[in-house]
Structures are given as C-alpha cells and as structure tokens.
Amino acid sequence: MRKLTGFEAKIAPYTAELRVYCLRLARNHWDAEDLYQEVMMRVFQYYRNSGDIRQARPLLYRVARNLRIDQYRRSRMQSNCVSLEERSDPGACLADACPEYVAVRSLVEWTAEHLTKREMCMLFLFAVFRYTYREIAEELGCTLSAVRMVLHRSKLVLRSSANTGGSAIKTDVRGKVVDFWTKALLHQTPSSRQNVSI
C-alpha cells in the first residue's frame, strides 16, 4: 500500500461524503463527477499555495457549494428565460444550488421587516454567533446597557409579530443589509461593525 501525500492524507477521510454532497448539489452523476473533480483541483491549488489545510471538510464543502452556485448562475445567465432583475441580483435563484438559501433569506427578510440595521446586527451577533453583551458592545462601540435594551426590545418586537401575525413596521433596512446577513448566516461568519453602516 503506497503512502499518501500530505494533500491526500488531509482530504482522504472526506472524499466519499464529498461525492455524495456533489451528487446532491448537481442532481445527476455526470455533473456531480465534474463538480467533484473541479473541487479537487481548486482545493489542491489552495493547498499548493498555502502549504496546508487546517479544516479540510468545511473547505471541501464550501468550495463545492460555491462552484455549484457559480455554475448555476452561468447557466441561468446563458438562458433567455432570466429576467433583468435576476441578472442584476447576485443572490437570485440560488434555491436549486443551495437549498438552505431560501430558508435563511426568508428569515433575514422577515427580521428586516421588523428591526433596524443596528437591532438586526445585535440580534444576529447574540443569537446566531453567540457573542456576549460585552463583545457586542465592543464590536459596535456602544454601552452594555444599550445592548441589553436593544436586544430586549428586539425580542419583544419579533415575539409580538410572530404571535399576532402583526404587520411589518417601517425600518431603515435595505437590500444590501439583507444580502449581507444572508451570506453571513449561510457561511457562519460573524460580521464586524461595518455591517451597521451598510
């Protein structure tokens, strides 16, 4: 039995499940195999440039998902059935390529209907990314009491809207903020204070 190279040793435990994941994304064996090969090439290039892969599994999955989304966008752009709005919106029609996209986007849009940018930021940092009150205050340059007050109010507003089916209130949240938080939640990457000023 031959000895595995450094790259092979890093990815070998995940290749079988990566093939299954590629098949789930591509929905047919031919495209899945092409996607798998492309992922391997991209990850190998990354390994060659960086010299190491610290977390192979998340990297393989992220590259596969991003490549599939890119392929889907290209195919949609080449077809004549895409509206001008979809062509200009980088987040449009990703449901087939990334099934969780629709659920996450819907959650962010619903939250954006009821909260301001600052409230959304604090709530997502606290509830999703598990920041402490102190970390949120430092990140956003405000006091601990302001964080407590905003989070308390935000939870009350969302709870009330969910329970009563209340109508949305006017907020200062725009599409860029919704796009920002959708990507942040999908990629599990917390943001910085820049998101408040988007």
Image: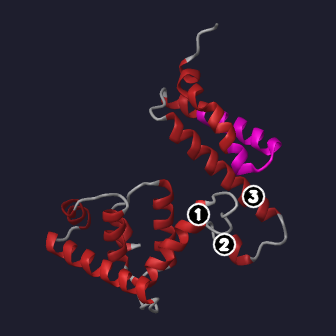
- Cα distance, mark 1 to mark 2? 18 Å
**Secondary-structure class at tag 1:** helix
Quarter occupied by residue 87: bottom right
Q: Are marks 3 and 2 in contact (CB under 8 Å)?
A: no
Residue to which mark 2 is pinned: 88
- Cα distance, mark 1 to mark 3? 18 Å
- Looking at the rendered structure, the kind of residue marked 2 is Ser
Q: Earlier in the sequence, mark 1 or mark 2?
A: 2
Q: Position of residue 99 (x, y in %)?
A: 63, 60
Q: Are marks 1 and 2 in contact (CB under 8 Å)?
A: no
Residue to which mark 1 is pinned: 101
Residue to which mark 3 is pinned: 74
Q: Position of residue 12 (x, y in %)?
A: 59, 25
Q: Which residues are magenta?
A: 22-43
**Is 14 contained in the magenta span?**
no
- Cα distance, mark 3 to mark 2? 13 Å
**Is 26 contained in the magenta span?**
yes
